[in-house]
Structures are given as C-alpha cells and as structure tokens.
Amino acid sequence: MDVVKIIKKNMAIIIPAVIAAAALLLLIPSVMLRGKISNKLEESASLGRSINSMLNTIVSSRQPEIEKKHQDSHEIDANQIDKLAMQTTQRELLSYKIFPDPNETSMQIFNEFKREYNTAFAGYVKNLKALDAPTDNEIRKLAGSVTISAGNESYSPGTKGDDKIVELICKSRSQEIPVYANPWVFSGYAFWDNWEYKGTESAVKDCWYCQLACWIHQDVIDTINSINAGSSSVDESSVKRLLSVKFTEGTRDSGLDLPVYVNETVGGLCQPWTGRKCNEKIDVVHFKVSAIVRADDVLKFMSALCSEKEHNFAGYKGELSPEKYKHNQITVLESSITPVDRNSAENKRYYYGSDAVVSLDLICEYVFNRQGYDVIKPQSISDDIAGTSSTGSPSYDSGNQGGGYGMPGMPGGMQ
C-alpha cells in the first residue's frame, strides 16, 4: 500500500524519469550506429571516387597500338635528325677516285684532281658575276678605243683629262657587276701551280685539304649571292667587295693557304666561345672572311653566312642520282668593323656608290659531322687530327698561328 501510494504521489516525477531513462537507453546504440553508418558512407564515397578514377584512366584495348605509334614517331624523329646531320657533310667531291684511298695506281688521278680544283677556282668569280677594278692595261685599252659612259657622264677620246678618264672607266665597271672580287681573294688558289708528287699518302692529304677549302669557299659565295640577289651593280649590292677568305694568319702566300683542323694541340684563329674542337663526333676548322659591306647590312651578311644552304650529293663514288641536301655548318666566332678610307692609294679604282660602307672582318668556325663523312676520310687525315701523323698537315706546311688572334684593319674602297 505504502509503495502504491508513494508511486501515485510521485507519478509526476517518475513518468518523466522513466521516459528519460528509455531515451538514454535508445540514444547509446543510435550514436554507435550513426558512427558505423558514417564510416560506411565514407568508405562508399571513397570506393566511388576510386571507381570514377579508374573509369577515367582505364586503358583502352587499343592502347598498345597507340603507344607503339607514339614511340615509332619518336624513333622516326630521332632517325630523321641523325639523317639530316649525316647529310650535312655528305657533300659533292671534286674527284670520286681518291677518298679514302685512290682506286687507281696512276698519278694521273691527282692531275685530274688538280684540273677540277683549278676549274672550281676559275668558276668562283664567275659564280659571283664579279670582276676586279680595271687594271692599267684595261684602262689604256678602253680609253683609246671606245666612248666611256658612267651615269650621266661620258668620255670620248681627246675630250677630257687622264684622271677623269680613269674615274669614268672605274665608275663604269662598278655599274656592270654586283660585287668586286678576283680569284686571288680565295686562299689556296695557287696550291697546285708548282705542286710536286711526294708519294700517295701526301698527295691524298693535299687533295683532302683542298676539298675542304672548296666547300668553305662555295658557302661564302652562296652567301654573297643570296644577299646580293637581284642586284646588277655594286651601288645596289649589300656586299660591295670580297677582300679575302683565309684559313690561317701570317704573311705567308695565301695562294697556298689551306684549312687546318682545330684539335687538342692546334689552335684556331681565335679562342672560340663555342669551345668546339675536333672530337669523336665533329671536326672543326676556322676561317676568316673579309668584305666591304653596306653599313646597314652587316648583321644581314652575318646571318646569311650562318644560314642553311643547299648542296647536291650523288654518293661518295658518284654512283647515285644527285639529290638536294641541306647543310648549316658556319658559326661566327669574332667580328670586327673598321671604317673605309675611300681615298687611300691602295683602294683607288673601287667605287661603292653613295652607301655608307664598312670593312667587316669575321672569324668563323666550320663544323663537319663525322658521321656523314668519316667513311671517306683518309687515315692520314685521322692521324693528323689525333696528332699521330708522321707527315704533318698538308704539304704546304700551314704554320697555323693558333689563338690570341688580333684583328687588323682591312683595306677599303673608293667613292
């Protein structure tokens, strides 16, 4: 009775307490369950993200085929680069009977080379459509036989003084040609004039260095022709006069001057900023080109000299149909610009028109990719480069001066 009374009396307190206790009992598993659900949801979301990622990156059944094409394209690019590098020094030859070893025992093949070499030099000035300033004999002949015209002026025999005759004849010459040049500006032009046979190895070596000279000279000629294209007179041209193309320094006769390889023991015409010298991949020679150039076109000339050029290649035995290849082998190492004294005695008879002109001297390096021409390089040349040759450089004995080059001023022209 007492318990019942107590319960009835405290019913208002007991009922909320029971409800609270029941709620507490229900809350604990709910919290635990919610944590499990949250974990499950996170696991599900992570699994979903993984599946989506896999769906986005899943390898196609054609992937091996696609990858092969991708790798093949890289291989083609690499092979193409190697091929182009080889073609750079796969060049036309003056004779296909000599390198790397003569295919005949007769000395006649060297006489044939001499003939081709001299023909090449005779063609250099012709290729430039160039002439030199008139000589005394030319002036005497012209002054005594024809009426001379130069611009708005003319002369007939007996009408004007001798100085005016010379002036008009020289001006007339400048209007007939795009550039001044003569065969003697190309070093090595007289190499074969008094050449003597001193054995096969020495003769092959002489032919090789002469061949290098011809390749370099031809690039200089192509450069001048490219930037003087369309010009019919010195007045209109960017390059007014080619002064020289040399391979060594010193006072020795440039007619015998041939290229010299730059290696561990033989320096070049300067200390090259490229750091290049002959190694297992390339061979290097230096050369110097000097010219009278329109002042505004100095950079144009340098750019053209270092630009890509074309050549024909018909195999190293001349057995293939000629193909056009491209080469780009020149880098300018040093440059020097000096003013032109148009009135100096050593430069009279050269007329450059009204353009401001300068004398430009460039020291350049010429790089040969060995992969392209080692197959025809004579063993004696390889010995020269390695410093193991018993006969030295070409028989002209170059006497290369090596580094520490000081650029002298060059002669200029007249008005």
Image (spheres, rainbow, N blue to C red):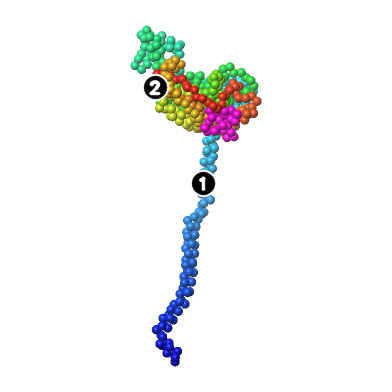
For the residue pair 195 and 102, the one nearer the viewer reads as: 195
- Residue 235's disc number: 2
- The residue lying toward the viewer, choosing from 260 and 251, is 251
User: Could you give the CA–CA distance between mark 1 and mark 2, rounded to whole angstroms?
Assistant: 55 Å
Q: Position of residue 324 (x, y in %)?
A: 50, 31
Image mark for residue 330: none
Q: Is residue 360 above or below residue 84?
A: above
User: Circle 1 sits in a helix, a strand or a loop, which is it?
Assistant: helix
Q: Closer to the N terminus: mark 1 or mark 2?
A: 1
Question: Taking 321 as reference, is 158 left or right?
Answer: left
Seen at 52% across and 33% down, the residue is: 274
Is 267 included in the stretch rendered in magenta? Answer: yes
- Mark 1 vs mark 2, foreground winner is 2
Q: Image check: 392 left or right of 410?
A: right
Residue range (magenta): 262-285
| Horizontal and vertical percent position of residue 119 | 52, 20
- Quadrant the C terminus occupies: top left
Dot 2 alpha-carbon crowd within 10 angstroms: few under 14, some 14 to 19, many 20 or more = many
* Residue 316 appears in view: no
In contact (CB < 8 Å): disc 1 and disc 2: no
Label 1 CA crowd tier, 10 Å (few <14, some 14–19, many 20+): few
Badge 1 amino acid: His
Residue located at (39% from left, 11% from top): 163
**Image point 36% across, 13% down: which residue?**
154
Q: Residue at x 53, y 28 (%)?
A: 270
Residue located beneath label 1 in the image:
70
Residue 124 image position (x, y, % from top left): 49, 22
What's the magenta bit mostly, secondary-structure-wise?
A: loop
Q: Quadrant of the N terminus?
A: bottom left
